[in-house]
Image (cartoon, helix red, strand yellow):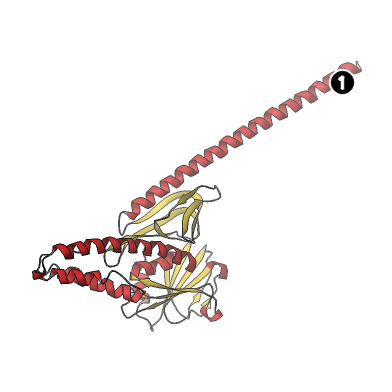
Amino acid sequence: MKKAQIAIQFNWIFIFIVGAIILAFFLVVIKSQAKQSNLELSAELINNLDTIIKTSQRSSGSFKIIDLPAVTLNFVCKDGFSNYELGNTGLKKDIPYDVIFAPSEMNGAQLISWSVDWKVPYSITSFQFLTNSRIQYIVVNDTSSPFSRDLFNLLPENITKKTVLFNDQIDDYNYDSYKIIFFTKVPQNINTPKSKTELIKIIPSSNGLDGYGTIKFYEESPSSGNLMGNSSYIRKESLLGAIFAQDYTFYECTMKKAYNRLDLINNITHYRTWNLSQETSIDNGCRNIYIHALSLLTYSTVPELYQNSVNMRKDNEDLIRGRNCPLIY
C-alpha cells in the first residue's frame, strides 16, 4: 500500500514538473512572438515616420501634426553622425543628409513637423523642425529690442509658445523642456528646472532676423556664466534651427550638414556660371555680370556669405532687365 502511495505521489510530481516545463516553453514562445511582433510594429512605424519626414521636406512651408503611438523618439547629431531611434528598441534610421532640428528626446502621441527652404540666395536645402506640445517656447519681450514680437509671430501658431516680459515670473508647468529666447534683457525670475531649461540669446545684425547674427546658448541664466557656445546664423531659417535644436552641439552638427550642402550647390552654380560667361557675347553686358557673380561664390565668414548672397540676387535680377540673358539660378 505504501509503495502504491509513493508511486502515485511520484506520478503527480512528475506531472507537475513536465507541466511546468511545457508552460515555461509556451511562455517563452509567446514572449518571443510578442517581442518579434513589437519589433515588426516598431520597424513599420519608423519606416512610416521616415516617409512622412521625406514628404514634408518636399513641400516648403508645410506644417503637419502627426499622430503616433505613445512612443519615445530620440534624435542624435554628433561629430557629423546623425540618426533617430525609436525608444529602446534598438531600431535606428540614419539621416546623413537630412537637415533636421529637433530635441534629443520627445515623448507623447503627437509629432509636430514644419519644413522651410533655406535660400542663400537660391534654394540650398529643406530645413525641418520637429517638436511636440510637451515643449514650451518662451519669447522674452522688452522695449529695448524690436525683434521679439517678430520672432514670436514667426513661430507657428500650433506649437506651445508664449511671450513674457523680462521681469515676469516664468514658472514650471510640468513641460518636458523649456526654451527661453531673449534679445537684450536677461529674464529675471526663472523657476523652471535647470535640467529642463535652455536659454538662447539672439544678437541680430542691422539686417534683422532674416539677415545674419550671433546666437549664444546657455544652460542656465547668463548671469551664472554657464555658456554652452556661440554660433552664427544666416537667414531666419537657420535662426529657427537654433530654437528647435536640442542645444549648441546639436545645432552646430546639423548646420554643418547644411553648409556642406551649400558648398556643393555653390560648386554646381560656379560651373554653370562659368560656362555661361564663356558662351555669352560680351556686347550685351551679360558676361561681366557672370564674371562678377563667380567672385561671389566663395566666402570665409557668415557676414561675407550674407552680403555675397544679396549681391548674387542683384546680379540675377540684372540679367533680366533689358538683356534677356540666361539666369544664374
Rendered location of residue 3, percent (x, y): 89, 17
Of the 4 image quadrants, the one containing the N terminus is top right
Q: Does the rendering let one see residue 329?
A: no
User: Which element type, helix, strand or loop, lies under badge 1?
Assistant: helix
Residue plotted at (56% across, 71% down): 194
Say which amino acid is labelled 1: Ile
Of the 4 image quadrants, the one containing the C terminus is bottom left
View extreme (right): residue:
2
View extreme (front): residue:
278
Q: Mark 1: few, some, or many residues within 10 Å (few <14, many ≥20)? A: few
Left or right of residue 185, residue 35 in this image = right
Residue plotted at (55% across, 73% down): 191
Rendered location of residue 177, percent (x, y): 51, 65
What residue is pinned by disc 1? 6
Q: Does the rendering let one see residue 194?
A: yes
- Residue 214 lies, with reference to residue 260, above or below; the image says below
Q: Nearer the viewer, residue 228 or 320?
A: 320
- Residue 110 lies, with reference to residue 291, above or below; the image says above
Dividing the picture into quarters, in which one does residue 124 lie? Answer: bottom left
